[in-house]
Amino acid sequence: MSYAFNGRRTAAAVLTAALLVPLAACGSDDSKKDSAAKAATGAPKANLTVLAAASLTDVFRTAGAAYEKSHPGTRVTFSFAGSQELAAQVKQGAPADALVTADTKTMDGLGPDVGTPTVIAKNRLVIATVEGNPKKVDDLKDLADTELKVVLAAPEVPVGRYSQKILDAQKIDVKPVSQEPNVRAVLSKVELGEADAGLVYKTDAATATDKVDAVEIPDAQNAIAEYPAATLKTSRNSEAAAAFVKWLSTPEAQKILRDAGFQQP
């Protein structure tokens, strides 16, 4: 009887060991894959959350897909809003890993909450009008027409500050029918016909060419918008976040930004 018991125990031990071997090998393989992915891309796998200015909505979706493709195992989730809203979220401790704003002032205002910022792109303003430009808006001074329904971004929003800056420089007094929380809201008002014209970024107007017309503003009367990117000090994926921010300045990312109409930093 003792021999039978020992035999069964030995057989059980052998079976258990046999089952554990592939599990151990699988764990080892996963570890090797993670290490290989990091070695190949220079970044560990992670689920990143990036807070980004509303004007980056379309281009960052394309950029995020490209980044995930070249960085297996990493997922990038974006949260888009006006830069001032994003800054408020950072100050409130929102769980995120990186931030990209549409101006340096907002980023600089966060001080120690962010890492060292890097400007990744630039932009310019245009006058967005209802498709076909029925009100015949030709330049900035036309926006002062009291018969024209003009919508602008609020002054605390980067595009709102840029807009006011160029209007003040030309001594043009505009009475907007509304002041919106971000550039996409301005564009939407024009798209829906709720406004005759609005000041938006050139790249935003380019996303709605079937609904709005874009009236160019001469360089001498325009403003340059700069987009700084930085990691957040509260990130739980600091290494992966730094890798993403660095990637935004690579030729691959810069081509995606230029194809969308953004200028080189």
Image: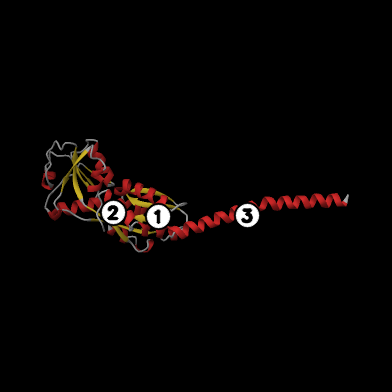
- The residue that label 3 is drawn on is 24
> Measured from the top left, where is residue 130 in percent x and y?
19, 37
Comparing labels 3 and 1, the label whose residue is closer to the camera: 3
Q: Residue at position x 15%, y 49% from top?
A: 217
Residue 210 to residue 91: above or below: above
In this image, 67 relative to 205: left or right?
Answer: right
Comparing labels 3 and 2, the label whose residue is closer to the camera: 3
> Measured from the top left, where is residue 59 in percent x and y?
32, 48
Q: CA distance from mark 3 to mark 1?
A: 43 Å
- The tag on residue 92 is 1
Q: CA distance from mark 1 to mark 2?
A: 20 Å
> Measured from the top left, where is residue 189 in percent x and y?
24, 39
In this image, 110 relative to 178: left or right?
Answer: right
Q: Amino acid at mark 2?
A: Ala
Q: Residues within 10 Å of mark 3 (few under 14, many from 20)?
A: few
- The tag on residue 102 is 2
Q: Amino acid at mark 1?
A: Gln
Q: Residues within 10 Å of mark 1 (few under 14, many from 20)?
A: few
Q: Determine if residue 156 is in view.
A: no
Q: Amino acid at mark 3?
A: Ala
- Quadrant, the C terminus: bottom left
Comparing labels 1 and 2, the label whose residue is closer to the camera: 2
Q: CA distance from mark 3 to mark 2?
A: 48 Å
Corner quadrant of residue 87: bottom left
Whichever of callouts 3 and 2 sits on the residue coming sooner in the sequence is: 3
The answer to which of 199 and 14 lies nearer the viewer is 14
Whichever of callouts 3 and 1 sits on the residue coming sooner in the sequence is: 3
Whichever of callouts 1 and 2 sits on the residue coming sooner in the sequence is: 1
